[in-house]
Image (tube, rainbow, N blue to C red):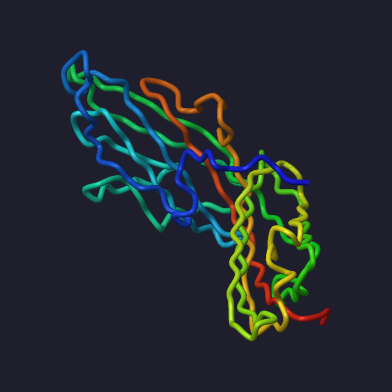
């Protein structure tokens, strides 16, 4: 059963996954001077499905006249001229993350904003061995299941498959399928008609490959979810834990 399509995404998700980071200083509001708008924060932490406590963080902070101090747990997140990011965040699946932003308000007083989340816990694909290639027969549904991730409120599934084939006119053609959905369930069936809409045209399969990976997410990820940044600011802060990628090979028959 399909989950809710994640066409709405607060953090740009196919840019692989990386948030486009805007500058700290925001635009001038239409009815007031620059900096009169509330502080706005968007960001996320991305970690892999490993016990090794290391991840990355990407944040954008808008509408502050001076570059703020941004920390996650005890680590200061550096400003690079466009935004705040690091690849050296020591955090593992299931651990808490505390975002703290201290900044100077337009009246030169000090402002504080922050958010708290728990990183989604470790999980794994259970229907297939991620260390081995999944052989997908042409014209077959793709069925994948995984274990639940502690603290996860939803799972973002990304899948793409491309293939080349010879048709019945001896011409070589290609097919491509891309899929991205957000769901709360721990299994998914992608119908063959979505992957192989041109199955009636395929005479001989020349080659085909693809991949599927899953992000367990925690935080305000659905449209209409309440903001989780509090204090003297607004915005969204999300935790994402990614399981091992599942590699796919399209074949003529079951192997």
Q: Is residue 126 left or right of residue 63?
A: right
Image quadrant assignment for residue 42: top left
Name the residue: 70% across, 73% down: 201
Q: Quadrant for the C terminus, please.
A: bottom right
Q: Nearer the viewer, residue 61 or 203?
A: 203
Name the residue: 43% across, 41% down: 43
x, y (%) of residue 251? 74, 80
Q: Nearer the viewer, residue 148 or 157?
A: 157
x, y (%) of residue 160? 60, 64
x, y (%) of residue 97? 51, 41
Q: Nearer the viewer, residue 59 or 161?
A: 161
Q: Nearer the viewer, residue 208 or 128?
A: 208
Outermost front residue:
169
Total marks placed: 0
In the rendered image of this protein, does residue 44 appear above or below residue 31?
Answer: below
Q: In this view, does 183 lie to the left or right of 174?
A: right
Q: In this view, does 187 lie to the left or right of 78?
A: right
Outermost top residue:
31
Name the residue: 75% across, 76% down: 135
x, y (%) of residue 111? 30, 22
């Amino acid at each position: 059963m399909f989950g809710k399509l994640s066409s709405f995404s607060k953090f740009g998700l196919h840019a692989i996954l990386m948030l486009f980071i805007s500058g700290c200083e925001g635009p001038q509001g239409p009815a007031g001077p620059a900096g009169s708008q509330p502080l706005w924060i968007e960001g996320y932490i991305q970690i892999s499905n490993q016990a090794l406590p290391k991840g990355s963080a990407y944040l954008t902070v808008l509408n502050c006249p001076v570059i703020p101090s941004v920390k996650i747990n005890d680590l200061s997140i550096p400003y690079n001229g466009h935004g705040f990011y690091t690849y050296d965040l020591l955090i593992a699946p299931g651990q808490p993350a505390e975002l703290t932003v201290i900044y100077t308000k337009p009246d030169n007083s000090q402002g504080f904003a922050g958010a708290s989340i728990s990183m989604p816990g470790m999980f794994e694909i259970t229907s297939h061995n991620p260390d081995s290639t999944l052989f997908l027969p042409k014209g077959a549904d793709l069925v994948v299941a995984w274990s639940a991730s502690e603290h996860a409120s939803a799972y973002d599934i990304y899948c793409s498959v491309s293939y080349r084939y010879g048709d019945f006119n001896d011409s070589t053609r290609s097919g491509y399928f891309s899929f991205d959905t957000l769901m709360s369930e721990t299994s998914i069936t992608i119908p063959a008609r979505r992957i192989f809409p041109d199955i009636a045209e395929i005479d001989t399969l020349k080659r085909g490959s693809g991949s599927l990976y899953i992000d367990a997410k925690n935080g305000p990820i659905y449209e209409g979810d309440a903001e989780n940044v509090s204090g003297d600011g607004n915005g969204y802060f999300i935790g994402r834990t990614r399981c091992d990628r599942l590699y796919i090979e399209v074949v003529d028959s079951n192997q």
